[in-house]
Image (cartoon, rainbow, N blue to C red):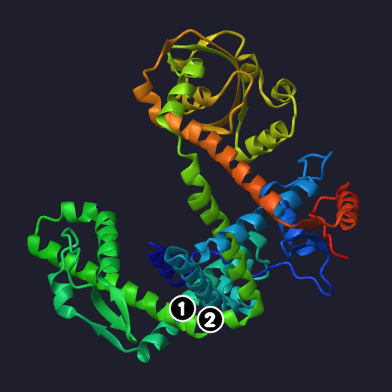
Amino acid sequence: MKKSFLFAFFIFYLFSFHGVESLCASSGKKVVLAEVNGEVIDEGLLQERIKAIHRDKPGARPEGGAGGVNISDLLQELIDERLMIQEARGVGLDRDHGFEKRVESFVARQSIMKLRREEVLDKANVSEEEILDYFKRHHEKPSQADKEISQRLRRRIEKKLRKEKEKELSDGFIARLREDADIRIDEELVELLDSEKDYTGKKSTIAHVNGDPIPLSDFIHDMKKAVQRQAGMFRRSKDNGQMEEKRKDLKSKVLDRLITYKLIEQEALRRNYMNRPAFVDMVEKRKEALLVNEFKAKLVYPLAIPTEKELTQYYNQHIDEFKKGYEVWFREMRFGDRKEGDKILEELRQGADFEFLATRVSDGSSAKRGMAWVRAESFSPAVRDALSQLKVGEFSDVIADGKQYKIIKLKGKRGGEPIEFSRVVERLKRIVGREKFEKKLSEYLSRLHKASKIKIHKKTLKGIEERYWKNSTGATESPALAD
């Protein structure tokens, strides 16, 4: 449950906060790259997309370099997304109740994070004097009086002291919220509740916090989760009276957490971060991302649901892909960690030769594998599943296989008996559905392009491509496009 997560995020201070408002800002006049039905796509949006690529794929470079970032293709993606957003708004998806609730939930979550930043993280500073004092009290020996603290130990001490301060600040802040709060609990209902029973259609509110209700459904949901986490404790308890006391204590803790979350949420929303331009900008970007998802889910996906005829046709035309007891001829690359595998996978997707890379990155044993036909049943389930999805000549994604990571290329496939249609129908739905979805999405976007007024500022685009290329050549960091 999202509320439970955010409450834990605020109270237990175990996660570092990554700013969500570091949005691209440039001074002066916007550099417009394209206009889509009167809405502009400027250099700032392109820059954000490039930065996202560099975060996800370190080392990415413009077309012609490692990584193959193509500025023109990125602009086309932004144009397509703008068309999807406009279409979603045009048919009223932004007024859908479910969409509005998701936006409200996002605003609440981000407001809580902002509040935590202001009231806890920004105030939990650790001084050099505090670090030295802690060291003297807990680590220093008489013989080390003049010895400096190692950097590693210094970081550990600072981290520990910071966590203690964060907890102290968080507890104090929540205590102040509770002092002024009007909290009303339906004690009788709490006493009678059993998390194992169904309360659908029953009394819907278990408490009020400053007039805002805490739904019974929230309490039941969190209580069930809490009981599941402590199932072992309840099983081991032989004393019914003791078990009932523990269950009562658990009820109290669950309700207390819900009340505390509600107080934090109320205070976060009361501060109205929506008055701050950067926060509003962040929310608008989230709305647009949600609208792209809504467009795909509600306008394209219904068109892409495969029919029985399409499933049967694909099955008959690709019968070799649905066989058991078959043999494969393959080549694989093995990696000690996933990051290494992801890096090689990106090179393959950009056109690198599999055989060359396999020789470069694999040890002798893995390089020799694939010299003979091997029964598919001899592979682990993860590898076998990946092989079943490949056509001859294709390579897999990075596969987690025990303690190793692998990329496999299917070079040949033979033998085997066809698997009955009924046993592969779900797999067929995924395969055919994915292909049909991409086709329907492309067709829908094509219609939107034809019906829209789109202007690309080619001279400006060319200048940015040249500047990006110049900044990227020999550079190790994401280029800053804006002067």
Vertically, is 442 above or below 98? above
Q: Give how far across and how far down residue 387 sits, in percent.
A: 52, 23
Tag 1 secondary structure: helix
Q: Amino acid at mark 2?
A: Glu
Q: Is residue 97 left or right of residue 32?
A: left
Above or below, 210 against 160 in this view is below
Contact (Cβ within 8 Å) of mark 1 with mark 2: yes
Residue that mark 2 sits on: 119
Real-space CA distance between mark 1 and mark 2, rounded to the nearest whole angstrom? 8 Å
Q: Determine which of the numbered discs, if any, sits on residue 170 in the image.
A: 1
Q: Quadrant of residue 395?
A: top right
The image quadrant that residue 135 belongs to is: bottom right
- Residue 320, horizontal then vertical, whole percent: 50, 15
Tell me what residue is drawn at x 59 percent, y 33 percent.
397
Q: Residues within 10 Å of mark 1 (few under 14, many from 20)?
A: many
Rendered residue at 29%/82% (across/down): 208
Q: Is residue 129 left or right of residue 319?
A: right
- Determine the residue located farthest toward the bottom in the rendered image: 180
**Mark 2 closeness class: few <14, some 14–19, many ≥20 residues within 10 Å:** some
- Please state which of residues 413 and 472 is positioned toward the viewer in this rendering: 413
